[in-house]
Image (tube, helix red, strand yellow):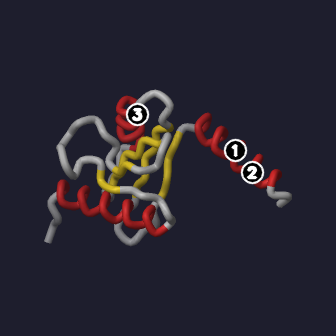
Amino acid sequence: MAINSNSKGKKGELELSKILREHGYDTRRGQQYCGANGDADVIGLPYVHIECKRVEKLNLDAAMDQARSDAKDGEIPCVMHRKNRESWKVTMLLDDWIELYREWSAGKELMGE
């Protein structure tokens, strides 16, 4: 039995939000209260605009375009996505990844690791 795409999208957003909460982040669905208002699909990670996709065939370029156009100034656009029976993945622009990596690496050096 096929699942309605809106229902699958909502379930994906709830699933992703739950995983992020398990990692200590206070996240929730962005659309749960007021519909399509330009919020990220999952909110609660400061400085990150999350476009959540829970589909078998993802047009990654279109999803990234949507994340980039909806992201507010100062937010890193990313697409968090997964297929059935697959792990969650994160797609983002290389320049944004380099910025995150640089900060992560600097933190490691400060910790003496």
Please tell me in which quadrant of the rendered image residue 55 appears: bottom left
Badge 3: residue crowd in 10 Å (few <14, some 14–19, many ≥20):
many
Q: Position of residue 89 (x, y in %)?
A: 48, 57
The percent coordinates of residue 110 (x first, y second) are 81, 51
On the image, numbered disc 2 is attached to which residue? 107
What's the residue type where badge 3 is placed? Ala
Kindly report which numbered mark, 2 or 3, lies closer to the viewer in this rendering: 2
Number of numbered labels in the structure image: 3
Few, some or many residues within 10 Å of mark 1 (<14, 14–19, 20+): few
Cα gap from disc 3 to disc 1, whole angstroms: 21 Å
Rounded to the nearest whole Å, what is the CA distance between mark 2 and mark 3? 26 Å
- Would residue 38 be found to the left or right of residue 34 on screen? right
Q: Is residue 104 left or right of residue 18?
A: right
The residue indicated by pointer 3 is 71
Position in image of residue 90 (x %, y %): 49, 52
Q: Residue at 25% x, 56% y: name it.
A: 9
Which residue is labeled 1 in the image?
103
Q: Determine the image quadrant of residue 113.
A: bottom right
Residue at 77 percent of width and 55 percent of height: 108
Whole-number angstrom distance, CA of label 2 to CA of label 1: 6 Å
Please state which amino acid type lies under the numbered disc 1.
Glu
Q: Earlier in the sequence, mark 2 or mark 3?
A: 3
Q: Tag 1, which secondary structure?
A: helix
- The answer to which of 28 and 96 lies nearer the viewer is 28
Q: Position of residue 48 (x, y in %)?
A: 47, 43
Q: Earlier in the sequence, mark 3 or mark 1?
A: 3
Residue depicted at 68% across the width and 46% down the height: 101
Q: Secondary structure at mark 3?
A: loop
